């Protein structure tokens, strides 16, 4: 028997580039949803324009794909006060790349499996990723969301919390000082529970 719990959500739209310029297309929308049943999962929903630039990299839909960040993607970062974070990279073509990091660009585990499905139309795409709650570091307090598309000089970098002070000449999505607050205790209560434990993080904390 499944025990239903309250489902909380967080919805954002990306309306700015990494260097704080306006985005001149329909914005990328990202929604975080907490668990609806006894399983402690975080659901990430994406609704976004489909540029198809670069083209589909050709990986297997639903599976990890190394270097996916070089293509058209949406990225979600979830960070705690000890600079531990989860990075979720989602492609409109169904590939993904999920990893945990123990401090700035310090990869601890990569190519972590998730449930991920996408739907594509001519000019839009949607994605649904189900992330095990144990993938998140304990007591997440901050986050950032990015979207990328285009190639070469036309490459576009968009972000929820951008580099408004011109700190970087080129985007650094791992600049944790730019992240903004999120109430993860409301969305995924177990992440802030005193009893929270994680097989993914146990060896590193």
Image (spheres, helix red, strand yellow):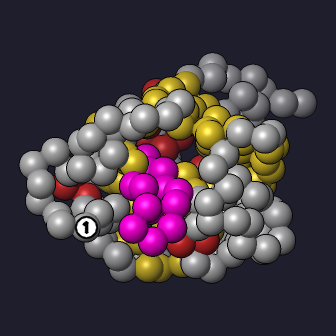
- The correct choice, above or below, for 158 with respect to 2 in the image is below
Which residue is under mark 1? Answer: 170
Work out which residue is located at the far front of the displayed protein and give it: 153
Residue 66 located left or right of residue 125: left
* Mark 1 crowd level (few <14, some 14–19, many ≥20, 10 Å Cα): few
Residue at x-position 34% and y-position 61%? 173
In magenta stretch: residue 152: yes
Residue shown at the point (63%, 79%) measured from the top left = 66
Please check the rendered image and state whether residue 202 is part of the magenta-colored stretch, yes or no: no
- In magenta, the rendered stretch is 145-157
28, 108: nearer the viewer? 28
Q: Is residue 37 left or right of 157 when viewed as pictured? A: right
Which residue is at the front of the view, 141 or 192? 141
Q: Is residue 200 visible?
A: no
Q: Quadrant of residue 42?
A: top right
In this picture, residue 2 sits left or right of residue 67: right
Say which residue appears at 50% left-offset and 27% top-offset: 11
SS category of the residue bearing label 1: loop
Look at the picture and state if 71 lies above or below 36.
below
Res 15 visible:
yes
Q: Position of residue 160 (x, y in %)?
A: 36, 40
The quadrant in which the C terminus is found is bottom left
């Amino acid at each position: 028997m499944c025990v239903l719990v309250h489902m909380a959500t967080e919805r954002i739209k990306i309306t700015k580039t990494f260097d704080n310029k306006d985005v001149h297309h329909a914005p990328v929308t990202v929604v975080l949803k907490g668990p609806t049943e006894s399983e402690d999962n975080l659901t990430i929903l994406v609704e976004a324009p489909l540029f198809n630039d670069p083209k589909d990299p050709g990986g297997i839909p639903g599976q990890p794909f190394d270097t996916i960040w070089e293509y058209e993607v949406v990225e979600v970062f979830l960070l705690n006060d000890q600079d531990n974070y989860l990075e979720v990279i989602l492609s409109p073509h169904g590939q993904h790349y999920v990893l945990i990091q123990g401090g700035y660009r310090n990869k601890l585990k990569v190519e972590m499996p998730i449930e991920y499905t996408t739907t594509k139309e001519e000019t839009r795409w949607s994605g649904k990723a189900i992330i095990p709650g144990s993938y998140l570091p304990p007591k997440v307090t901050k986050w950032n969301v990015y979207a990328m598309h285009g190639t070469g000089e036309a490459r576009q970098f968009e972000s929820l919390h951008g580099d408004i002070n011109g700190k970087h000449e080129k985007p650094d999505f791992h600049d944790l000082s730019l992240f903004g607050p999120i109430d993860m205790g409301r969305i995924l209560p177990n992440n802030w529970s005193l009893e929270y434990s994680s097989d993914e993080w146990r060896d590193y904390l």
